[in-house]
Image (spheres, grey):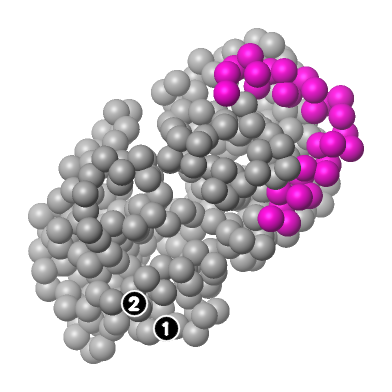
Amino acid sequence: MKIIYLGNFDNPYSDVDEKHITYSLEKLGHEVIPINERYFYQERNRIVEEVAEGADVFLFHKGGIKFNVALEDFIELLNHITCKKVMWFWDKVAIKEIAQNREKWVQSVIPFIEYAFLTDETWARRHNYKNVYILRQGIGDKNAHLGKYRKEYDVPIAFLGSVYGERIEWVFRLKAIFREKFKVYNNIFGENLCDFCASAKIIVAPKYPQDDFYWSARIYKILGSGGFLIHPKLYGLKEEFEEGKHYVGYKTFEELVEKIEYYLKHDEEREKIRLAGHKHCIQNYTYTQRVKKMLEIISEK
């Protein structure tokens, strides 16, 4: 297939999933033409031209919403594209802290495309779109390995991510209990993430903004990079991971504290779970496996 891929390819503050997906698509034998959504208005004519020259798929995630691309302008582009149009939307669709109205954007775009892949199964279950499918994120193939110990990441308890919304109080409470044992990190990815996961004893994940059928890519990236993770117990998560074998789960803040204290003292159990979670994740949830599933669905119709 020839795939026109509109994405955010140069984010310096993130592990650019678009690059992992491009690698996976090319690994599977497809031609990928990456187009940076940051330059949507400069590139939209090129997109139409590439489609006219024989593209099979137009793949996108947020259609430039992060860079103030007007919804009507994006829909106008969709109307000019004659190949299969595919959206893979990774975020929680409805979240009050986000300034942009994600839900309105998603609902407006879905009628103009053939396939909408979401990670937010909770939102999908509440609606009745015939062209919506669930496709979770994963771990980039190049990052799916164990890292090496680095002293700067040697910390008993770590949280890796942004602190906002309900996470603010969650972080404050953990700091109050564990003090210097608990540290917050951000913008660690690639080889650094593998080393981080090899060095931090326990990595914790917050509940917010997850729910029983929506979770972020954190679990794939941490387990796939070799980290020991304490993560909220979510009903849908049992379809992909076994709690207590691949990761350690918690329901309440009090249970989280108990699990942290327990696994800080039980190195062998912690290491067994860490290695089992890593092996399971890289065997089942790489981006190559996710992309292959997507293309199978697209090819069926």
**Which residue is identified by label 2?**
300
Q: Which residues are magenta?
A: 251-280
Give coordinates of residue 71: x percent, y percent. 15, 52
Q: Position of 227 compared to 294: left or right?
A: right
Nearer to us in this view, 87 or 185: 87
Residue drawn 10% across and 64% down?
76
Q: Position of 227 compared to 4: left or right?
A: right
Give coordinates of residue 195: x percent, y percent. 75, 49
Vertical side of 266 occupied by 137: above or below? below
Nearer to us in this view, 180 or 299: 299
Vertical side of 126 occupied by 163: above or below? above
Q: Position of 36 compared to 223: left or right?
A: left
What's the amino acid at mark 2? Glu
Alpha-carbon distance for marks 1 and 2? 20 Å
**Quadrant where the C terminus lies?**
bottom left
Q: Is residue 23 visible?
A: yes
Magenta-drawn stretch, dominant element (helix, strand or loop): helix
What SS does tag 1 mark? strand
What SS does tag 2 mark? helix
What's the amino acid at mark 1? Glu
Q: Give the residue at the far bottom of this rendering.
A: 53
Give coordinates of residue 246: x percent, y percent. 70, 45
Nearer to us in this view, 218 or 41: 218
